[in-house]
Image: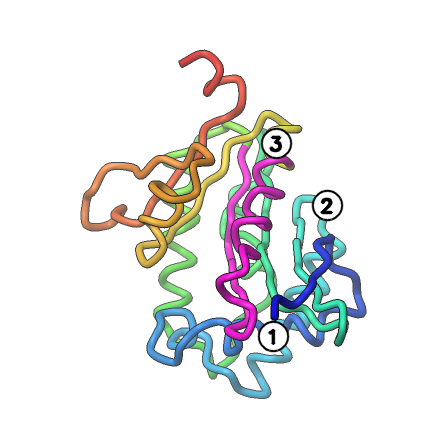
């Protein structure tokens, strides 16, 4: 039986459910649960991070909601940068709230590297960062991640903005399976998971 879900922007009442999306979506051995373990402190950090993002006009929190329980079962976060954005915002929504002692030091290092690479690759070109994608294990295989990604692409196209993301684990999925225009970047050791979807105007001209 396929569960029915509703896709929409997150609301304040969704935040508590969203705070557990990572442990519900990823195996413990995956990178994200390793750098953001599921503890009371990190759950509160997620809540604070999402609440801050809901008040940030540059952020969009797209979710899939289980119609029977009203809980979030899928999430995709977007963060916009344009010519007038400050360098301090290049880390996306997860750089807005200070990390807790429970976070891995690797996350802090990764956010710093993200700011630098995002600036180097994207420059002043308007673009969205896809920062987090997760689907509750019980709902995987129903196309929720694909639908959320399609919504993100529509949002970006309306602003003629590119999309930038870092993912080594899901690189093949975005580039070869989705068919939405995502292209892998140079395969240097430090950028093996860098994927970019060009602006709508640029894709039309090629």
Mark pair 1, 2: CA separation? 20 Å
Circle 1 SS class: helix
Circle 2 SS class: loop
Location of the C terminus by quadrant is top left
The residue at 68%/75% (across/down) is: 17
Is residue 138 located in the magenta-colored stretch of the structure?
yes
Location of the N terminus by quadrant is bottom right
On the image, the x and y values in percent for residue 49 come to 64, 66
Which label sits on residue 5?
none
Contact between marks 3 and 2 (CB within 8 A): the answer is no
Mark pair 3, 2: CA separation? 13 Å
Looking at the rendering, the stretch of residues picked out in magenta corresponds to 127-154
Circle 3 SS class: loop
Q: Which residue is mark 2?
A: 57
Camera-nearest residue between 189 and 64: 64
On the image, the x and y values in percent for residue 53 come to 68, 57
Q: Which residue is mark 1?
A: 45
Q: Which residue is mark 3?
A: 84
The residue at 61%/72% (across/down) is: 46
């Amino acid at each position: 039986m396929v569960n029915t879900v509703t896709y929409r922007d997150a609301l304040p009442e969704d935040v508590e459910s969203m705070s557990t999306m990572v442990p519900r979506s990823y195996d413990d051995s995956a990178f994200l649960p390793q750098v953001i373990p599921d503890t009371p402190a990190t759950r509160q950090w997620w809540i604070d991070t999402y609440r801050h993002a809901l008040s940030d006009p540059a952020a969009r929190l797209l979710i899939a909601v289980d119609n029977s329980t009203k809980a979030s079962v899928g999430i995709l976060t977007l963060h916009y940068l344009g010519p007038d954005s400050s360098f301090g915002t290049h880390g996306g929504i997860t750089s807005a709230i200070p990390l807790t002692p429970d976070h891995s030091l690797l996350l802090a290092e990764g956010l710093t590297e993200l700011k630098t690479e995002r600036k180097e690759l994207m420059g002043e070109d308007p673009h969205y960062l896809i920062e987090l994608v997760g689907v509750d294990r019980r709902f995987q295989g129903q196309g929720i991640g694909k639908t959320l990604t399609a919504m993100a692409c529509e949002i970006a196209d309306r602003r003629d903005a590119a999309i930038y993301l870092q993912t080594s684990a899901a690189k093949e999925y975005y580039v070869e399976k989705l068919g939405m225009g995502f292209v892998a970047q140079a395969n240097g050791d430090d950028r093996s998971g860098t994927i970019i979807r060009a602006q709508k105007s640029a894709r039309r001209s090629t």
